[in-house]
Image (tube, coloured by chain):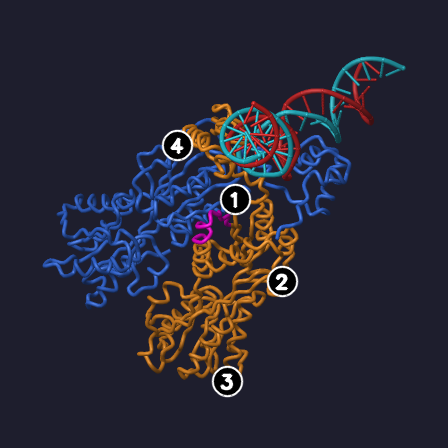
Chain colours: A blue, B orange, C red, D cyan
Amino acid sequence: MKNQKRTTIYDIAKKLNLNASSVSRALSNNSNVSEATRKLILDTAKELNYKQNSLASNLRKGHNQTIGVIVPRINQNYFADVIAGIEEVTYQKGYNLVICQSNESSSREVKCVNTLINQHVSCIVISLSADFEDDKHLQTIREHGIPLIQFDRVAEHLDTFKVLNDNEQASIDAVTHLIEQGYKRIALLEGPQNLNIFRQRKAGYLAALEKHNFPILPELIKENAWTKELGAASTKELLSLPEPPDAIFASTSDFSALGVLEVATKMGLKVPEELGICGYSNEAFTEITSPSITTIDQYSVSMGKTIANLYFQEIESSDKDNTPKIVSIKPKLIIRSSTLKNNPEELTTD
Amino acid sequence: MKNQKRTTIYDIAKKLNLNASSVSRALSNNSNVSEATRKLILDTAKELNYKQNSLASNLRKGHNQTIGVIVPRINQNYFADVIAGIEEVTYQKGYNLVICQSNESSSREVKCVNTLINQHVSCIVISLSADFEDDKHLQTIREHGIPLIQFDRVAEHLDTFKVLNDNEQASIDAVTHLIEQGYKRIALLEGPQNLNIFRQRKAGYLAALEKHNFPILPELIKENAWTKELGAASTKELLSLPEPPDAIFASTSDFSALGVLEVATKMGLKVPEELGICGYSNEAFTEITSPSITTIDQYSVSMGKTIANLYFQEIESSDKDNTPKIVSIKPKLIIRSSTLKNNPEELTTD
DNA sequence: TTAATTTAAGCAATCGATTGCGATAAAAAT
DNA sequence: ATTTTTATCGCAATCGATTGCTTAAATTAA
């Protein structure tokens, strides 16, 4: 269906009895073209409906004003927000975004990486899939001289640019808050420990307990409680313990926390009086549930902007092989009703 | 920072004392290369860490296995879902996605279109920005021979491929449901009427009322009630009328419906007994509010898949200039508590 | 053994834009 | 009037992969 070929600089040149080089220079607005012919060229370019061929231009210039982004799921709020943040900045700079989703599968992640390398993108931004084990594909990126920025879920030992949330500190804040509210037996719903973020959140949980001389009770730590359903299932198990917890920190996600809340409500447990609940991510719905759910905001959009700015300020601008930088963003504990056992008036105000 | 140049087919050719053409043929797995040299080439390609340069390849082949997508906001659930659906299919076909967001601004939309044209994408998929007025940029796409698929928010009079929701029917279903539940004065929160989707939803509202011989009361129709805040404001106005409505159809979005719910709750109105509420989009939170909100599911992910399939089945495969097709997807009314005045047991079960 | 045919690989043009270098003409300096 | 400088513009190579055509070699047929 694409029959008519598009007009090139040669078409413009021919029509004006000029050389293509002049047309190129006029169009790139750069140098050594008289004002008269420039105007002539610009006019006929418009007349002939000329549009530059970025493929040719990029091939010649040896680079591609494009940044590749690989995320587990495009339509997961957190990642969608990060992408929106990246796009906001890259758009200003005239860069494009090529988006891939790994679908939480590392084999697909590898394919995405290869495609982006083929595309000669200027930079690859990635957040790892859940079944991450091998970082060979990340090494490949570096071998090809493509700057790599990892965010959120990263291969920690790999020396690349990183934009992270301080998951451990956020976790400490959350658990400390629970302790201060008078909860005594605090359970943890944890995620896959091959991912740094979940390891860190667990570490924060442990650190906070230890600091306040709380015992660490393995039976109160449930792994693999990622989704609402899994969170609900774990909650049932926890609440049927001889000594059940009086608070649950769903460090995996707000969805998991929602599962906790639903089970608690169904079992007639009062939240926050009899069970405190804290989620993670500040999903929109946490504000709406009754009671509203205490959670942690990750500043996702601004994380995206940070990622893009990192590229433009640290990588693109400098010509030297600069050492990778790590930017850490401190998430914010959003205190809501689901954990306010003591002081309901202490609600966070924005 | 990108100092080492990448290995090309010429590097491989030189190393094996072959011609680049043979390398190209071996790599493309096509024709006229002996098994022996093919293996040799493949091996050294791996050894030298060769990755094809898609820019050069696409330039030569005259096309680009890339589809450009322009949406108002990447991180709006509906659009994120559609994109995820598109990506799912295009990934299988080895196509890439270039994503742009117009930020609800048509001037930015125009720039996005131009970038995608420059990139020589194989197809452009677009959902229009809120301030849509002029379709010149869409015409430009066609002038450049690039297939165009509009979805959801479209320029109706333009003869292009379209993937749509049957907004009018969905609206009829919703309002009919309200009528059947015994609501007598049904208000409408409407969106910008320059967008087809909001016009259609309004038309459905009017059609349903007319069919049941309900009077159309202009004071019950509120424009510009898109967000939660605007929805709340309109609700306040509606409820302070001498004869306030007993149901509100927030045809703009679930967020607007949420605003309605919050105002109603604050004013002590019982939902659904004293006020029925229906939203649009089936956002995740509508299930969680108390009462849960009746809404309309748009099958967003499957819309994305439909879009991509339309491209591959109708456009890419056929070589003739085929006439644009319109695919309409029937949304589904999800009945929840917020409208069940009569029969609370009638809840939709999935 | 020679001719006809198939197979494998090289040659060179091409996609469209960019850019260093050189050429020409006009303007400025002497 | 002659030389020097500057402003414009053309020439041609280049980016890396693809592909039609040609040639050389190998295989088969006669």
Could you tell me which chain the residue with mark 1 belongs to?
A
**Residue at mark 1 shares a chain with residue at mark 3:** no
The magenta segment? B87-99
Indicate which label's residue lies in the foreground, 1 or 3.
Answer: 1
Which residue bears the numbered disc 3? B214
Q: How far is mark 2 from mark 4, CA to CA?
A: 50 Å
**Residue at mark 2 shares a chain with residue at mark 3:** yes
Could you tell me which chain the residue with mark 4 belongs to?
A
Indicate which label's residue lies in the foreground, 2 or 3.
Answer: 2
- Choose the circle earlier in sequence order: 2 or 3: 2
Which residue bears the numbered disc 4? A324
Q: Which secondary structure lies at badge 4? A: loop
Could you tell me which chain the residue with mark 2 belongs to?
B
Indicate which label's residue lies in the foreground, 1 or 4.
Answer: 1
> What kind of residue is marked 1?
Asn
Disc on res. B158? 2
> What kind of residue is marked 3?
Phe
Discs 1, 3 touching: Cβ within 8 Å: no
Q: How far is mark 1 from mark 2, CA to CA?
A: 27 Å
Quadrant where the C terminus of chain B lies?
bottom left
Q: How far is mark 3 from mark 4, CA to CA?
A: 67 Å
Which residue bears the numbered disc 1? A96
Q: Which secondary structure lies at badge 3? A: loop
Q: How crowded is mark 1: few (under 14 residues within 10 Å), some or many (20 or more)?
A: many
Could you tell me which chain the residue with mark 3 belongs to?
B
From the viewer's perspective, tell me whether residue B296 is left or right of residue A134: right
